[in-house]
Amino acid sequence: MRASQRARGEDVALVDSLLAADERRRSSGVRFDELRAEQKALGKLIPKASGEEKAELLEKASRLAAEVKAADAERDAADAETQELLLQLGNLVHPDVPVGGEDDFVTLETHGTIRDFEAEGFTPKDHLELGQLLGAIDVERAAKVSGSRFYFLTGVGALLELALVNAAMAQATAAGFTPVLTPALVRPQAMAGTGFLGQAAQDVYQLEKDDLYLVGTSEVPLAAYHMDEIIDAERLPLRYVGFSPCFRREAGSHGKDTRGIFRVHQFDKVEMFSYVTPEESQEEHRRLLEWEKQWLTSLELPFRVIDVASGDLGASASRKFDCEAWIPSQGRYRELTSTSDCTEFQSRRLQIRVREGKKVRPLATLNGTLCAIPRTIIALLENHQQADGSVRVPEVLRPYLGGREVLEPVAK
């Protein structure tokens, strides 16, 4: 755990604080049990005593009651401190994860061909220019209505989102996932249990009056779906594909990706989620990645797969793979999907266990973005644009767009 904290760039001393708190919890628990046993034994003697002996026993019982109460409080305090420190620790980093910060990832594979627009004879437009030409994206009116980092999808933009959602859901259900429409508001235990009230807390919207949180991803309600349950091993793997709005404060991203719809406060997403035995988690992680690759390939997008470095994992992930699509206007790859193996980190916090015969133990949870709508729209518009401002529709989406092969600019 110390090595894992070091790899994450997190406080290593936290591990020692946790061990010390746990030792206090154990010793205070033993002390409480001893005093309670003594108190019970004394309670049996008092009715049999009389006179001066009884008075002494009653005085001793009074002192003992105070000591028991103090020991109980000490035990509870040590237990609370232990739990608080536990919640501050991230998951154990997988030994194969590259160590370092955001830029220390390892590229695992590259797919597709990056278009040479110069050779084609025109300069590519960015997604906002294209979106405005198509009558698909309106950020100016969204700023008027909601502020910066919001957007309207209009006309073919709205239809494109619905096409993406339906096509992604079709792929996932064909692979055996159960489709789920999840709540966008969750209780604190769901948010904390999935690891989003630690280092990610600054990005979370909280409704203090109602003691609820807006989810940043349907991973949260999908993980908490089986909270406080014991699942028979025969039912595993359990795979769900959720669709939900996602809300993110984007704290600390001031000045970054402000143009268009790349980094926004609210967006929709299709998310895969798996429950498996701990022994199956690494294989399931690879399967989730393959489903993501299948999706991006069907959209005919050039992309690469990276093994995310330890300092950029997020608290709950033991290992994370990102698929980054090529964005022509930026001249670089940007994250489009992500899949994380959370091992037993979330299930322990949420009390989700698997029953194998007479044995009950925590299971493993994994998540994988299938389609984050705004960034997918960006990648589609920019990579499939044509010189006249129209956009070619990938074959996989055409049945969900009334057979459209091209999105045409609208007359002003």
Image: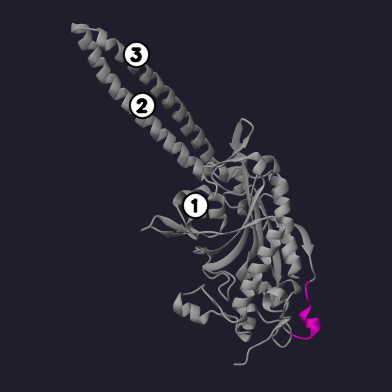
Q: Check residue 71 in the rendering and tell me which mark sits there, or answer none.
A: 2
* Label 3 vs 1, first from the N-terminus: 3
Query: In front: 60, or 327?
Result: 60
The span shown in magenta is 114-122
* Label 2 vs 3, first from the N-terminus: 3
Query: In front: 245, or 132?
Result: 245
Instruction: List the residue tagged with mark 3.
Output: 41
The quadrant where residue 391 appears: bottom right
Residue 362, percent from left and from top: 59, 39
Secondary structure of the residue carrying tag 2 is helix
Mark 1 or 2: the one toward you: 1
Residue at image point 49% right, 36% down: 17
Determine crowd level at label 2: few under 14, some 14-19, many 20+ residues with C-alpha closer than 10 A: many
Q: Is residue 254 above or below residue 55?
A: below
Query: In front: 178, or 11?
Result: 178
For the question of whether residue 393 can be seen, the reply is yes
Residue 99, percent from left and from top: 67, 49
* Label 1 vs 2, first from the N-terminus: 2
Q: CA distance from mark 2 to mark 3?
A: 17 Å
Residue type, mark 3 in image? Ala
Secondary structure of the residue carrying tag 1 is helix
Q: Is residue 306 magenta?
A: no
Instruction: List the residue tagged with mark 1.
Output: 191
Determine crowd level at label 1: few under 14, some 14-19, many 20+ residues with C-alpha closer than 10 A: many
Circles 2 and 3: CB distance less than 8 Å? no
